[in-house]
Image (cartoon, grey):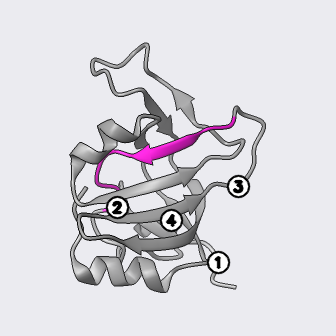
Amino acid sequence: MTIDDNQLTSYQEAIGKSRCWDGFTSTTKNHEKAQTFGNILFIIDANSNGGIDISALSDYDEEEVLLPPGTTFTIDKVHKTETNTLIYLRLPPSPTAASTLIHLYPTPSTSDEHCCDESAMSSGAIKHLTDG
């Protein structure tokens, strides 16, 4: 995934806040595979909320794990290096298996695509939950 400086700033300003992806989110457990997809990696601490492993169903060898629509997360940290940017996200605990996932595809297309009204959300957008 590739984002511009304005989008990166939006993530930096949202550190410590809860957000939600409206659409399905494709991730991988394979860090090396994820590094080939752009200048940014979302490092997702899935703790005990690991999504659905669809590796056996996927046409691609990506160790793909699918997060369902409405997956909530907290933005913990944004770290910019010489070659890329790492955005660390934390999912709330749930009864599923623990793992760390890395975001593969451009969800959201901009970090400004967020609001409080779910009906106004487009697929793949980031949504405010609480800023408290």
Against 6, residue 125 (above or below) is above
**Residue 12, x across and y down, in percent:** 44, 81
Question: Is residue 41 visible to the viewer in this orientation of the structure?
Answer: yes
Q: Amino acid at mark 2?
A: Pro
* Disc marking residue 92: 3
The residue lying toward the viewer, choosing from 120 and 11, is: 11
Residue drawn at the location 34% of the way across and 61% of the way down = 108
105 within the magenta span: yes
Crowding around mark 1 (Cα neighbors within 10 Å: few <14, some 14 to 19, many 20+) is few
Choose the circle earlier in sequence order: 2 or 3.
3
Mark 1 highlights which residue? 130
Between circles 1 and 3, the one closer to the viewer is 3
Disc 1 and disc 3 in contact, CB within 8 angstroms: no
Choose the circle earlier in sequence order: 1 or 3.
3
Whole-Å distance between the Cαs marked 4 and 2? 15 Å
Mark 2 highlights which residue? 108
**Residue 26, x across and y down, in percent:** 39, 40
Disc 3 and disc 4 in contact, CB within 8 angstroms: no
Choose the circle earlier in sequence order: 4 or 2.
2
Magenta-colored span: 98-108
72 within the magenta span: no
Q: Amino acid at mark 1?
A: Thr
Residue drawn at the location 49% of the way across and 69% of the way down = 127
